[in-house]
Structures are given as C-alpha cells and as structure tokens.
Image (spheres, rainbow, N blue to C red):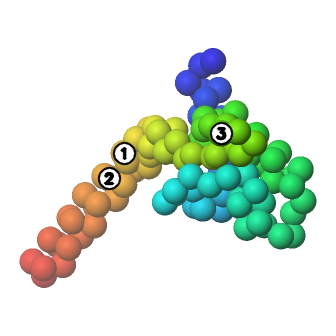
Amino acid sequence: MSITDTHDRVFKALSAGVRRQILDDLRDQPLTTGTLCAHFPELDRCTVMQHLRVLEDADLVTVVRRGRERWNYLNPLPIHDIHERWIGPHAKGAVALLDRLKTDVERA
C-alpha cells in the first residue's frame, strides 16, 4: 500500500466524530470492545464494531484478543505521520510569522 493510500485511510478514519471519540477514549489506556460500546449507548454494538474496523484498517487501533475479550489499543504513529507531513510545516510558518509580527509591534 502506498503512503498516499495510508494517509487516505487515516483521514477517512478521522472524519467521523464517533471514531475520533473512540481514539480519545483509548488515549490513556486500552479498553475492551464491550467498554467502548458502553461509551456509546446511542449506538448498537454492530455499529461500534464497524467504526473499530475502520480504525483498525487505518492502523490507528491495534486489537489483542485475550480469551473472549477483545482489547483495543491506540496506535498514535499514523497521526504523528500526518502531523509531521501537513501540520508541522504549516505551524512552523505560522509561528515564524507571529514572531515577526511581535518583533515589529515591539519596535513600533
């Protein structure tokens, strides 16, 4: 799979609010699928599982099965790659611009 395909999957996965919330829920600790389903009482288990599948396909979630339990772990590396490719360079330019503006204002 090309890097473009990988980034497309990550952006697709991040496009849904439920999936972003799942990633937020996994930020501090891995959770079972049952626990994640309980975080979304408005959704049925099948829908939550579909969202988890999209996150897995984007390599944002890693699943480990322990007996009957399915533990979901956040994999932050794809998000880091997106940040390094698109956000980081733009943020550096914005910070430099703000620094220049601050210097100009202080001189005036």
Secondary structure of the residue carrying tag 2 is: helix
Amino acid on which the number 1 mark rests in the picture = Pro
- Which circle, 1 or 3, is nearer the viewer? 3
Most extreme residue toward the left is: 107
Ranked by sequence position, the earlier of labels 2 and 3 is 3
Residue 10, how many percent across, how many down? Answer: 62, 40
What is the spatial separation of the Cα atoms under label 2 and label 3, in whole angstroms? Answer: 46 Å
What is the spatial separation of the Cα atoms under label 1 and label 3, in whole angstroms? Answer: 41 Å
Task: Bin the neighbour count of mark 1 within 10 Å (Cα to Cα): few under 14, some 14-19, many 20 and up.
Answer: few
Residue 29, how many percent across, how many down? Answer: 52, 56
**Residue at left offset 57%, top offset 46%:** 73
Residue indicated by mark 2 = 93
**Residue at left offset 40%, top offset 41%:** 84
Task: Bin the neighbour count of mark 3 within 10 Å (Cα to Cα): few under 14, some 14-19, many 20 and up.
Answer: few
Amino acid on which the number 3 mark rests in the picture = Arg
Secondary structure of the residue carrying tag 3 is: strand
Dots 2 and 1: beta carbons under 8 Å?
A: yes
Amino acid on which the number 2 mark rests in the picture = Gly
Residue indicated by mark 1 = 89
